[in-house]
Image (cartoon, rainbow, N blue to C red):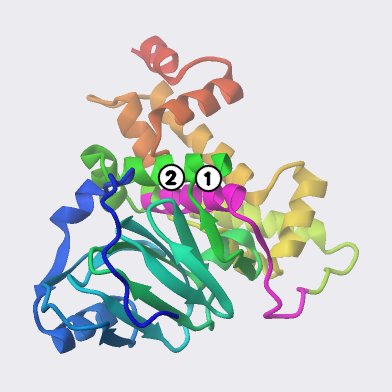
Amino acid sequence: MRTAIAPSAPRASAFEPALLRANRLFESQDLDDTRERISRVMQPHHLRPLGRPEGGRSHMDFLRLGGIGVGTIDFGEAMRVDVEHVEDYHLLMFCLRGSAQARAGERALDVDVQHGMVCAPGARFVADLSADCEQFVLRLDRAMVEAHVGRPIRFDEVLDLRRPALQAWLDQLRLLLTSPALMDAVRRHPLIALEMERLLLQLLLDGQAWDDAPLRAPAPRAAHGASPGCVRRAEVFMQAHADEPLRLGDIAQAAGVPVRTLLEAFRRARDCSPMQYLRDMRLDVAQRRLREPQAGTTVSAVAMDCGFAHLGRFSQSYRARFGESPSDTLRRAG
């Protein structure tokens, strides 16, 4: 890696996380203080100014949303960041402005506003950042990822933000970080926070190459005849906890089987996944509330309370299940 990076040519950033600016974690001109502050929300690491330090003022903006941490970091001068091994999370990084030469594990990568990188849990991360670089960073807790996906995974290190397949993920991330109403709903409603966590992860999985990480042995298959019991246990658990934030791993644990076994059992017995079953269960709750409204009941409030962050998607799912819009149900009840 180079020992110094000249400031890159000015470029307009296509991504501006406006709501992060209201969540400034710190500003500092002291390198040790900067390192300590960042370590509190990321992990211990090494910082070394490149070339002649200009004494720039560093800052970090940061938000924690369930199993996702999102933030920006600007050192105000060219800097080498060295993380000996990324702890129990997947680290995603690209530049809001400026550029970097990075290494994720054994892979060298050029990073800028159109090209990012992903560093796996346990891998070394090193980056030489230009003096004008402001990083956008996400940490996806490994436990959260595995709870949703059902198994360990490893993302491809190259995060090409120009890829059409990643645009839905970028659009959702941009919406979350620019819409005060959506951010407020996510921070106030645990169910909405979990659904946003799941949506962002699913869109990333759809747009970014990944494979099963060779970290654990495959979960054993259930013995023949065990599936109906685990499905019933999962259904009882979901009925009792439908108004709580639930991940796939939570349901499998309550059913007493590995995630893969539960997924296969639901496909055979219910022709759907456990999370689709839970979604339909919550739609049923929403319908009951709309059919028996209290004073002041609104479609948007019911959707939020039942864990649907996006009113349009709620309406589409509701119509597909019940053959009418939620507003029609509420209107007839009135």
Q: Residue at 47% across / 50% down in the picture?
A: 200
Q: Residue at 29% across / 48% down in the picture?
A: 11
Question: Is residue 242 among the parts visible in the rendering?
Answer: no
Q: Amino acid at mark 1?
A: Leu
Q: Amino acid at mark 2?
A: Leu
* Rendered-image quadrant of the N terminus: bottom left
Q: Position of residue 90 (x, y in %)?
A: 49, 70
Label 1 SS: helix
Q: Is residue 237 above or below residue 59?
A: above
Q: Is residue 62 left or right of residue 323?
A: left
Question: Is residue 308 among the parts visible in the rendering?
Answer: yes
Q: How far apart in space, not on screen, are marks 2 and 1 (Cα)? A: 6 Å
Depth check: give the residue in front, 282 or 2: 2
Q: Residue at 24% across / 83% down in the picture?
A: 51
Q: Is residue 269 left or right of residue 57?
A: right
Q: Is residue 105 above or below residue 46?
A: above
Q: Quadrant of residue 12?
A: top left
Mark carried by residue 307:
none
Q: Is residue 274 above or below residue 281?
A: below
Q: Which residue has dot 2 on it?
A: 170
Q: Quadrant of residue 317?
A: top right
Q: Position of residue 245 (x, y in %)?
A: 44, 55
- Badge 1: few (under 14), some or many (20 or more) residues near its Cα, within 10 Å? some
Point out the stretch of residues depicted in magenta: 193-219
| Magenta stretch holds residue 240 | no
Mark 2 in CB contact with mark 1 (< 8 angstroms) = yes
Q: Position of residue 27 (x, y in %)?
A: 10, 71
Label 2 SS: helix
Depth check: give the residue in front, 313 or 127: 127
Q: Which residue has dot 1 on it?
A: 166
- Badge 2: few (under 14), some or many (20 or more) residues near its Cα, within 10 Å? some
| Magenta stretch holds residue 195 | yes
